[in-house]
Amino acid sequence: QVQLVESGGGLAQPGGSLRLSCAAASERIFNINVMAWYRQAPGNQRELVAAFSRTGSTNYADSVMGRFTIARDSAKNSVYLQMNSLEPGDTGVYYCNAHGIWYTSDTGNIFDNHGYWGQGTQVTVSS
């Protein structure tokens, strides 16, 4: 099992900024294929916001392009989401996701192809 610990989020006014952080809490992990942020607004399905692969490629939802920036610190197994120019439509619960995890074990290196989720953090954009 992989535990993803999220922090950040909260309340912001339209036009404001927030920063989310997420770290995979295991010293045995030495590589993660993709780390990403998803969000879910009330009554809506969970949607991809931004993703960062271990090769350095990123992709963003059209709705956040130019406003949000995803960053990654592979040495810390962490991913961040800088959210600027926030809009009320950005309101929702934001979830960190890690997929394709390499970790060490007593029997050697292991690849876990499952996706893991953080607990979610609320982002509310309102005046």
Image (tube, rainbow, N blue to C red):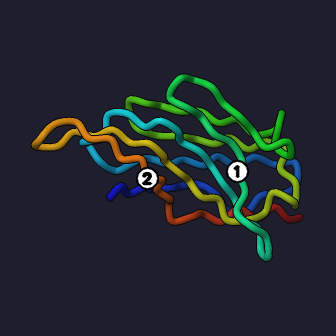
Q: Is residue 96 above or below residue 110?
A: below
Q: Residue furthest left?
A: 106
Count of numbered tags: 2
| Mark sitting earlier along the chain (2/1) | 1
**Contact, CB < 8 Å: mark 2 with mark 1?**
no
Q: Position of residue 8 (x, y in %)?
A: 58, 54
Q: In what element is the residue under mark 2?
A: strand
Which residue type carries mark 1? Leu
How far from the left and from the top, in percent, is residue 123? 70, 62
Query: Viewed as shown, does residue 2 lie left or right of 61?
Result: left
Residue placed most toward the observer, 112 or 44: 112
User: Which image quadrant is residue 71 in?
Assistant: top right
Image location (x, y in percent) of residue 52: 59, 34
How far apart are the two marked residues, 2 and 1, measured between alpha carbons? Answer: 17 Å
| Residue 39 picture location, percent across and down | 69, 59
Question: Which is nearer the eye, 50 or 20?
Answer: 50
Q: Nearer the viewer, mark 2 or mark 1?
A: 2
Screen quadrant of the N terminus: bottom left
The quarter of the displayed image where residue 111 is located = top left
What amino acid type is highlighted by mark number 2?
His
Q: Is residue 26 left or right of residue 97?
A: left
Image position of 57 with respect to 18: above or below: above
Q: Residue furthest bottom?
A: 43
Residue 48 has which mark?
1
- Left or right: residue 20 versus residue 103 is right
- Kindly identify which residue carries mark 2: 114
Residue lying at 77% horizontally and 58% vertically, measured from the top left? 12
Task: Bin the neighbour count of mark 1 within 10 Å (Cα to Cα): few under 14, some 14-19, many 20 and up.
Answer: some
Depth check: 89 or 84 in front? 89
Q: Residue visible at 36% across and 55% down?
A: 2
